[in-house]
Amino acid sequence: AYLCWDFLRTRCPGSRPEHRGSWVEKLNRAGYAVCGIDLQGAGRSEGRRCYIERFEHYVQDVVDFAYALQTPPAAPPPGTGAALVPGFPADPAAAPRFLMGLSLGGGIATHAMHATEGAGLFRGAVLLAPMISLQGMASRGPNLVLRLVAALLNLLTPQLPIVKGEPNKVFPIIQQLWDADPACFKHGTRVRNALEYLRACRTLAGELHTLDFPFIAFHSARDRWTDATGSRQLYELSRTTDKTLIPVDHMFHMLTKEEGWRGVLARALTWLDERAGGGAAAAGPGPGPGEAGGHEGSGGAPKPRPASRDGE
């Protein structure tokens, strides 16, 4: 939701996210330009904080942004704060594009890939603990009770931040970094958002067998925020033969920051490199299960690394 939090590096609680040592820097050094947006109301975007009327608005924003990147380059009007338009080539062969998303962003990326299948806009997706299923969180504690009155609350107070998630007790330093960042939303998920997230997951669950795009997904069985079963169902039911599922059970949820993130990034970069040159999309159907690019990872899963101040 908040791009700088997800993919830049925060060295200590209260410090600003920075490029040096981050996922973005390492992707840049590997030859990849990284472009992204803060979701509506999240991070530095405008609008009511972390509120959305319909989940599809998130998806359309991502698709519109991807198309905007290939318009002629232009500098923003002075004083507007608008972003520079880089003007990447429209031809996917000249500038292959991939989607990468974490948590809610991973769910949005999955929907965006599905919505643009056949358009040639994206060559594949890197999904990090993607929001494909939320049944675990929705069925725990007070959230289960809230589901019973959610329809009424949605009519009366859709913006009420009432749905509570769990703190990151596995990697408490990550929770401290989140709590100290003024751009991170500290309250519960709003009623409308919670219902939209559940609706998006239900819709996707009924369409998993139709999904046909290359992807690599990373998920931990210990994740208490998004269900690892969602990533497994995506892997097992989707039509594509170019699919990879990597269990990262030594991690929790924030796969770009927690202990072991370097291993996740290295595996993701290998996957990207294999498809950025000739391209899985250009080459046609990928290899079958058990071959490179069409397998479930096991022994090749990233291994834990010693923790440091910023969760490395």
Image: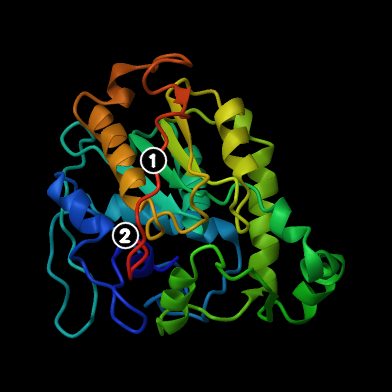
Q: What residue lies at 35% left-to-right and 17% top-to-bottom?
A: 284
Q: Quadrant of the rendered structure where residue 91 is?
A: top left
Q: What residue lies at 70% left-to-right and 77% top-to-bottom?
A: 158
User: Quick check: marks 1 and 2 in contact, CB under 8 Å?
Assistant: no
- The spot of residue 269 in percent (x, y) is 27, 39
- Bin the neighbour count of mark 2 within 10 Å (Cα to Cα): few under 14, some 14-19, many 20 and up: some
Q: What residue type is labelled 1?
A: Pro
Q: Mark 1 = which residue?
A: 302
- The spot of residue 31 in percent (x, y) is 14, 44
Does label 1 or label 2 sit earlier along the sequence? Answer: 2
Residue in the foreground of this view, choosing between 106 and 299: 299
Q: Is mark 1 on a helix, strand or loop?
A: loop
- Bin the neighbour count of mark 1 within 10 Å (Cα to Cα): few under 14, some 14-19, many 20 and up: many
- The spot of residue 261 in percent (x, y) is 36, 52
Quarter holding the C terminus is: bottom left
Does residue 25 sit above or below 84 in this rendering?
Answer: above
Q: Which amino acid does label 2 sit on?
A: Gly
Q: Mark 2 = which residue?
A: 36
- The spot of residue 172 in percent (x, y) is 49, 71
Does residue 99 sit above or below 142 in this rendering?
Answer: above
Looking at this rendering, what residue extends furthest in the front direction? 306
